[in-house]
Amino acid sequence: MTEPIIQTRHLSKLYGSGETVVRALHDVNLEVAPGEFLAVMGPSGCGKSTLLNMLGGLDQPSEGEVWVAGEDVAKLKDMDGFRARTVGFVFQLHNLLPTLTAQENVEVPMQGQKIGRGERHKRAVHLLELVGLGDRRGHLPSQLSGGQRQRVAIARSLANEPALILADEPTGALDSQSGEELLALLAQLNTSQGTTIVVVTHDRRVAQATGRILRMRDGQVVDDHRVDNPLEEDLRMLAHSQLGQALLGGNGQSSVGLLNGTEREVLRRLLTRFDDAPGEETPAEIGDLLEILGRDLR
C-alpha cells in the first residue's frame, strides 16, 4: 500500500489565549496520496490557508501532527532545506523578484542546492519552456502579464523537483482566461509530472478541475469527496452557496421569490443545462437531489 504524502493527525492550531483564543484549525485528520490533485474550499477565515501553512512547514501546530513525505514536520531540524527539496509554493501574488529575469527567478530556489551553475540555467530554461514561456526567459516581471508572472511562479515552484506543490488562490488575481490557462497548466503538470498538488481556492472552476475537493468550515473538514461528475459538482456548489441555502430553507416561503434577478438567471441557466443533459435526471427531480446533497454536506 502506498504511503500518503500528506497525513495530519488531530491537527489543531490556536492563536492567542484565554478568552481571546482563536481556533483556526480543530482536529483535522487528512490523508493525501502521492499524485493527487486536491482543492481546499470554504468561506474566508475557515482555516484553508492555515492548513496550507501547516503542510508547508510555514507554521507549527498547537496540537496534533503533520507528516509530509514521511517526515514529522514539527521535528525537522532543517526546515528550510526540507521545504527547498520537498515543497513548492505558489501564492496569489507571484512574489517574483522585480530586478531578476524570469529565468533568474526560477533559478533562485536552486541556489544552495548541489546543482552547478550550468545545470541551474539548463533546468530553468526547461521549466520555463514547460510552462510556455521559453521565449520570455530574459524578461523582467514588469514586462510580463499577470498570467505570465504566475506561470513563472509555477516554474519556480518546480525548480527542485518537489514532491508536493501548495498553491494558495493561484488564480485569484487573474482574469478568467488567464485563470483557465493556469488551471490547465496545473492539471497538465499533475498528470505529466505526477506532482501532488493542493490548491486553496474560492473558484469552483479550479475546484472542479481537480480530482478531490475538501470543504472546510470553522477550522474543521465538513466534506471530503472525489470529483466524478461535473453536473453533480455544480449541484454541490449550489447546495453550499447562499442561493442553495435559500432553496433548501424549510421556512414555508417560496425560495425563488427571495432571489434577485441575477440569482434567478443563474438558477435558470443551471436548470436549462440540467434539462438538456442526455440521460440525466429531469428538472422535476432537482429539488429532491438538492435536498439530499444539502443534507449530506451540512
Image (spheres, rainbow, N blue to C red):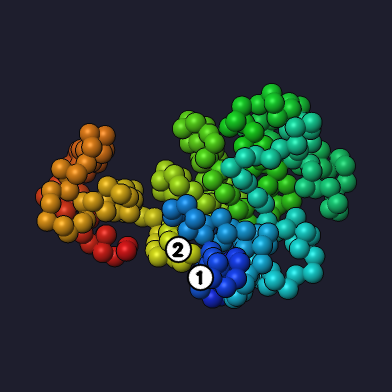
The answer to which quarter of the image holds residue 249 is: bottom left
Q: Distance between the residues labelled 1 and 2?
A: 8 Å
- Residue 260 lies, in percent from the top left, at 23, 37
Residue 128: give its label.
none
Near-viewer residue (65 or 23)? 23
> On the picture, is 43 further left or further right than 90?
left
> On the picture, is 205 further left or further right than 266?
right
- Residue 297 lies, in percent from the top left, at 32, 62
Q: Name the residue under label 2.
A: 218
Q: In which quarter of the image is the C terminus?
A: bottom left
Near-viewer residue (110 or 269)? 269
Secondary structure at badge 2 equals: loop
Of mark 1 and mark 2, the one earlier in the sequence is 1
* In the image, farthest residue toward the front: 19
Discs 1, 2 touching: Cβ within 8 Å: yes
Near-viewer residue (231 or 217)? 217
Residue 69 visible in the current orientation: no
Q: Which amino acid does label 1 sit on?
A: His
Residue at 61% from the left image edge and 67% from the top image edge: 16
Residue 249 visible in the current orientation: yes
Q: Mark 1 points at which residue?
A: 26
* In the image, farthest residue toward the top: 143
Q: Which amino acid does label 2 sit on?
A: Asp
Residue at 75% from the left image edge and 55% from the top image edge: 84
- Residue 153 lies, in percent from the top left, at 66, 40
